[in-house]
Structure formats: C-alpha cells, structure tokens
Amino acid sequence: MTTAKTVAFHTLGCKLNFSETSTISRLLENDGFIKTDFESAADVYVINTCSVTDNADKECRHLVRRIQRRAPESMVVITGCYAQLKPEEIASIEGVDLVLGAAEKFNIVQHLKELTKGDSARICSCDIEDVNTFHSSYSVADRTRTFLKVQDGCDYTCAFCTIPMARGKSRSNSVENVVAQAQELAANGVREIVLTGVNLGDFGKGFEGGKKREETFFELIQALDALEGIDRYRISSIEPNLLSDEIIDFVSTSRKFMPHFHIPLQSGSNDILGLMRRRYRRELYAEKVKRIKEKMPHCAIGVDVIVGFPAETDAHFQETYDFLHGLDVSYLHVFTYSERANTTALDIQPVVPVHVRNERNKMLRNLSHKKQQFFNEQHVGQKRPVLFEIFNRDGYMDGYTDNYIKVTTNFREDWKNEIVEWELR
C-alpha cells in the first residue's frame, strides 16, 4: 500500500495569488495528496510567488533555503509571477526542482508525476504573449468568505509594473460562469465573496466558443446582486478610471455589495502620475471619492499609494501627502517603490535614495493610522451588521462590518459564520 504524499503551500502577494494557491491545493488533494502546514515536513512544497517588489523575490529565496534545512529530500515547486518573469534565476536556486510559469501552474499534477528528485530544476514556461486562457480560481480558508478570481492579466503599461509581463493580456471569466461558481460557493456555506483580478474593472474581455466576448463589470455585479444565497460581495480593487458612476450608484443601493471600495491612487501629484503612465489625474480620483461619499457617507475607501518613485521630489511627495490628508478616505496601503527589471521607470531620473523612500513610507503609514482611527470613531454608537468568522482565537473571534470596520469580541459558537447587528464602540 502506497503512503499518500503530503504537500505544503506558501503564498506571497495578493488576494489573486491566494485564490490560485487554494485552487492548486484542491487539484493536488483530488489527486491524493494530503495538505499539511508549511512549517511541517512535507514531500512537496509549493511556493506561489509575487514579484511586485524586490522583497517578494528575496522572501522566495529565503523560503527555499528554509525548506532545504528542514527537508532536503522534498520536492520544491515555484510558481507565480516571479516564476514567469525570472524562471532561470529561480531554477538556479539550490533545492528548487520545478518552475511553473503562468500557463503551467494549473498543470502541476502532471508535472509532478514526471519529476524525479535530484535532476536539474525543470522549467515549464512559455512566452507571456502565448498566455491567453483564463483559469478560474477561488480560495476557501473558512466558510465565511472566499476570494473569487474573475479576471486576470492587464493591458495597461504602468511604468513601475511587471504584472503584464508576468500575467499577460487582460482576460476574464464569463458572467454566466461566475454566477454558477457563486451558486456553488453559497451551497458550501460561504457568506461573503470578494471579487478579485489584476484589473477588475476591465472584466469582460475574452473569447468563448471562438468568438470575442463583450461583457462588462457592471453587468457582472448586477447578475451577482440578483443571486440568492450569498449575503455579501466586496470589490477587491478597481482602477479610478474604470470605476464608473453607474457602478458607484449601483453599490449605493445594492442589497449585497458592501459599502467598501479599494481604489489605487499611486501618487497625488499629476507630474508623477504622468511619469507613472497612469490613466487618470488626481482630479478624477477626487471626483470618484466625492461621489462615493455623497451616495454613501458611511462607505470605507482604501487607497494604494507608492512612495519614492523616480523623480519624486520633496514637493511632489508633499502634494501626495496633502492630497491624501484632505481626502475623505479610510485607510492607505503604502508601497515603497522598488526597481523592477524591464520596466520603463528604470529610465527615469533622478533616483530617490532608499532612506528617503523609507521616511516617506513611514509618514504615510502614520497618516493611514490616523485616517483609520477617524473613520472608526465616526461610527461609534452606530449599529452595523458584522459577519463573524469561524475561528476561535484564544477565546476571541473577529468579524467585519459591512463598511469594513474590524470587530473583536469574546468567542461565541452560535455566532460563527453569522451576521450579527453590532453596536460599535
């Protein structure tokens, strides 16, 4: 009798990566693998990588070294964005056995069957231009919520970004397929779905039956809103130029789409936005925030911002700081600019010193903390619906309001995966 092999996973990066890791895990479990914790000894380790920053690349290499010390005879598989961008670099890391590019990550079962430990690292990848199919994915860490991938790839050419090179052209699932998946998830007890993608507002591109499909993100959210069984939807992130007034207005009256937007800004300086090759100016961003707050004063708005982009002067950064300080937003995700190979930002001068980048990051993280505190305080005394998660964390449980305020309280078995009216305090 053959003993079932064990597999462990580690995910770097975004919600999209988490949804894909979860899908890869189910593929291997369906083939007989037993999933185990990444810190335990396993027969196979799978690392799903990010390559947005240099830190993500370094963390991948660090993880491989840890595996080598713990279980040198185990198979090590690297996939994700870093694997597509720099397969040879990854293959040269001692201990790596298999590198799977964007088109091959979901063929992992077959590749593992053809692999022998001790051989040179095998690279299974192709030119990103040849990646044109959409693979649906979703993550289920518990019954409460799932990250559902509905779109992949990006047709934009932002100066700092490697994602189009790592994931290819924009393509997506169909409205019909997404609705069917949502129905399946509802049947499994999922209460909340977070829609994810590389450029979510670009949903609708793709081919079906050899014909070009023309659907829109607005059509998708309308169809999902009408579906019974799912209580909540969130839009993970959407570009400001693709966040139409009709989407904002629809969410404001929706039964199920939560009053919560995450809208990348990247810079509050029009000069820097131009150098970044972003497709909007700060005035448009301010208009979107204003409309959201007019329709939904209680709405949470998250912002992505990059500090230390080449040619960002103190004056440019102050523009960003002042712009964000004056915006009615709830929290910031702050990224320190990191040089990435083959991006046009490498040609922009002057380069901002790393210590200056770090100082600016700290300033915006402090601003984010103040924004979050102010937003939370505005809702003290209000009753809002909280969806509690299933985990008992040392006698406590967490949940989120509809407008994304985190609530922690004493664990109650009867509140697991339930929506409870909660007075904020």
Image (cartoon, helix red, strand yellow):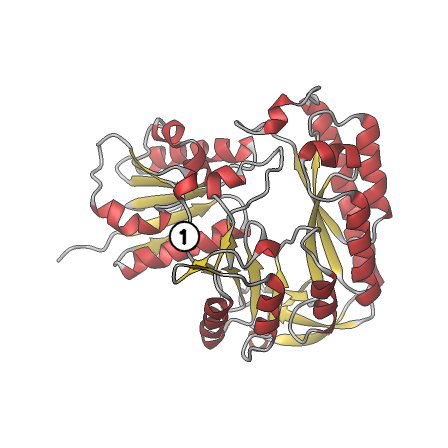
Q: Residue at x 29, y 36 (%)?
A: 97
From the top left corner, tell me how far across and down residue 88 is, in percent.
37, 28
From the top left corner, tell me how far across and down residue 69 is, in percent.
35, 33
Q: Residue at x 53, y 27 (%)?
A: 342
Query: Is 258 above or below relative to 161?
Result: below
Picture quadrant of residue 315: top right
Residue type beneath disc 1: Thr
Instruction: Tell me the quadrant of the picture where the N terminus can be found.
Output: bottom left
As drawn, which residue projects farthest toward the bottom?
Answer: 228
As drawn, which residue projects farthest toward the left?
Answer: 1
Determine which residue is flagged by label 1.
133
Instruction: Tell me the quadrant of the picture where the C terminus can be found.
Output: bottom right
Secondary structure beneath dot 1 equals loop
Query: Is 37 above or below relative to 178?
Result: above
CA neighbours of label 1 inside 10 A, class few (<14), some (14 to 19), many (20+): some
Query: Is 212 above or below relative to 179?
Result: above
Tell me: 159 left or right of 85: right
Tell me: 241 left or right of 182: right
Q: Taking the image as drawn, is residue 361 in sight?
A: no
Picture quadrant of residue 362: top right
Q: In this rendered view, identify the residue nearer to me: 122 or 216.
A: 216
